Image (tube, grey):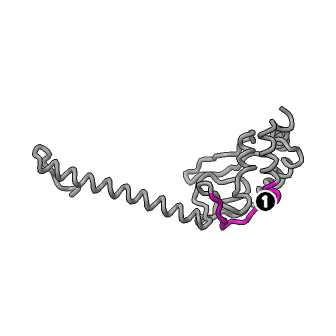
């Protein structure tokens, strides 16, 4: 029907065209639903389905999985320990800048260099609250066991979350 000519000057041609457009829209919506359902199922299985890579992990060459990057993983562990020592975000950000540590740097499939920027308070907060580091995957507020290896043990992660929550209510170590 794509190659056929429809005479839209009469009612029969317009009806045929509208029927075909309705089927095209229906098919497009079905494809969208299937894609969403497949991504949801993959998340529930603990697969990483994309997005920006996080510090401490590299994307497996075949995709769908995260692989621990040993050098970056050591940095992530050090950042968590720094936060537990200082109990505040600003001193940790200053220490990371002093050390010259940056966010995850990677090259896109098209060859663009992304990331590698100095840590900000917001970037540090995202790193400290990301459940991916415990070997889990967060999908729509539900935590699932991930297929990737954990970098941070759950005890350390929970202590950091408790400190962040406490500082959020009290205004932190220094206001």
Residue 40: horizontal and vertical position, in percent? 53, 61
Q: Is residue 102 shown above or below 148? A: above
Using the rendered view, name the quadrant where residue 92 is placed.
top right
Q: What is the residue that sits farthest to the top in this orientation?
A: 175
Write the residue at 46% across / 60% down: 35
State left or right for residue 145 relative to residue 174.
Answer: left
Q: Nearer the viewer, residue 89 or 143?
A: 143
- Is residue 156 inside the magenta stretch? yes
Quadrant housing residue 2: bottom left
Quadrant into which the C terminus falls: top right
Residue at left 71%, top 43%? 123
Q: Residue at x 48, y 58 (%)?
A: 36
**Residue 51, how many percent across, how many down?**
59, 53
In this rendering, position of residue 172 left or right of residue 2: right
Q: Which part of the image, by quadrant, shows the N terminus?
A: bottom left
**Percent position (x, y) of residue 157?**
79, 56
User: Exactly how many numbered labels are in the figure?
Assistant: 1
Callout 1: helix, strand or loop? loop
Residue corresponding to mark 1: 152
Is residue 152 part of the magenta span, yes or no? yes
Query: Is residue 2 left or right of 169 when viewed as pictured?
Result: left
Residue found 17% across the figure and 53% down from its top: 16
Among all residues in the image, which is located at the extreme left? 10
Q: Which residues are magenta?
A: 142-158
Left or right: 117, with 25 as reference point: right
Q: Position of residue 86 (x, y in %)?
A: 88, 44
């Amino acid at each position: 029907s794509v190659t056929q000519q429809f005479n839209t000057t009469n009612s029969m041609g317009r009806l045929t065209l509208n029927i075909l457009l309705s089927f095209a829209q229906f098919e497009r919506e079905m494809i969208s639903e299937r894609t969403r359902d497949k991504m949801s199922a993959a998340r529930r299985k603990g697969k990483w389905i994309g997005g920006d890579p996080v510090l401490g992990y590299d994307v497996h060459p075949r995709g769908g999985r995260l692989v621990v990057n040993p050098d970056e993983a050591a940095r992530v562990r050090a950042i968590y320990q720094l936060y537990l020592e200082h109990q505040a975000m600003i001193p940790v950000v200053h220490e990371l800048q002093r050390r010259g540590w940056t966010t995850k740097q990677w090259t896109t499939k098209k060859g663009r260099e992304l990331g590698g920027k100095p840590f900000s308070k917001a970037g540090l907060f995202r790193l400290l609250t990301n459940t991916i580091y415990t070997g889990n995957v967060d999908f729509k507020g539900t935590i699932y066991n991930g297929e990737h290896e954990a970098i941070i043990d759950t005890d350390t992660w929970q202590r950091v979350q408790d400190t962040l929550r406490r500082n959020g209510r009290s205004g932190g170590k220094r206001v």
